[in-house]
Amino acid sequence: MASAYSQEQIHLFLDYIGVSERYYHGPPTLELLTKLHVHTISTLPYENLSLHYNPTHNINLDPEYLYEKMVTAKRGRGGFCMEIAILYNHVLRALGFDAYTAGVKTRPRIEGVPKGDFPGWGHIVNIITFPDGSKFHSDVAFGGDGPTKPMSLAEGIIQHNLGTQQIRLAKEWLPSQAHRTESSKFWVYQYRNNPSQDWNSFYAFREIEFLQPDWEVVNHWMCTHPNSNQVRNLLVVRFFRRPTSTGDGVKQEIYAKKMLVNGTVKQNFGGRTEMVKY
């Protein structure tokens, strides 16, 4: 399926997130994917304000509506996972990337830590395949513990995230799975907040494409069910970027984040996350 966005819209989006004109017609490379990832999460905040404060308490996933809300209006708005990731997917495809969205099962936080089994579908990632066959996972809308750049879809590659946090992907069965074959394993996104800690599994996904009608079903549950994390919590996460230490002024990296979780404000400027206000 073709992207919903015109070339003019893509140019306006790239300008809005601070990507140079020289990338407008370039090939779909990992360098460009990384730049898009970093610039997107540091421009479009992860937030669910519309769900809590608009009159319908519902989220519109129409790609044109999402573009108007997050780009054209220029109000500094972002959205929750499906809003940002669907917009991002249409941008990727317009730029020539072989990209699709996949459903994700996210473990619930208990006292701030993901625990228990994996519930139903409640999150979204983009999966990108390059001409050489290599695949990458680009999650631009997971909030504070999301990856700050794309991850190779390969087992065990440890990637530095923000501050002292490390992340990786593992290939595993979920605890409640009955059908267990090599092909039924999930990719599992794992993190640890420093190298001395054990790995903890946060979410799981498979390489199965979700279409727009699938996301409408997930969106309805996320916006209406009393057990939905989005219904129960007000969330805003903003990442900050800066030029990398290479000094070329072109490559950017994520170096900090600020978060609002209900009435609590937290921040991380390269070390550990600390509470600012409660």
Image: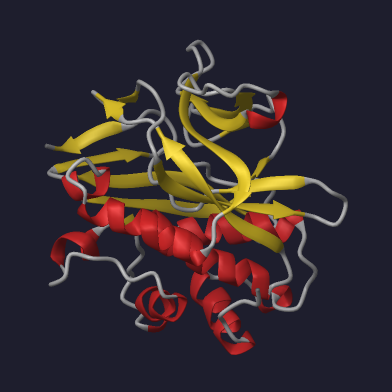
Position of the N terminus by quadrant: bottom right
- Most extreme residue toward the front, as rendered? 179
Quick check: 57 above or below 8?
Answer: above
Asked if residue 56 lies left or right of residue 162, the reply is left
* Residue 86 drawn at (x, y percent): 49, 64
- Most extreme residue toward the right, as rendered? 132
User: What colour scheme governs how the chains and residues are painted in the rendered image of this protein?
Assistant: secondary structure
Residue 145, quarter of the rendered image: top left
Asked if residue 76 lies left or right of residue 191, the reply is left
Q: Residue at x 57, y 74 (%)?
A: 14
Nearest the camera: 115 or 165? 115
Quick check: 12 above or below 176?
Answer: below
Nearest the camera: 260 or 221? 221
Position of the C terminus by quadrant: top left
* Residue 30 drawn at (x, y percent): 74, 54
* Residue 204 drawn at (x, y percent): 51, 34
Asked if residue 265 lies left or right of residue 99, the reply is left
Nearest the camera: 21 or 111? 111
Q: Residue at x 53, y 21 (%)?
A: 178
Q: Across the whole image, how many numbered discs are drawn on residues?
A: 0
Q: Residue at x 49, y 68 (%)?
A: 87
Q: Is residue 80 visible?
A: no
Q: Is residue 263 visible?
A: yes
* Residue 69 drawn at (x, y percent): 35, 76
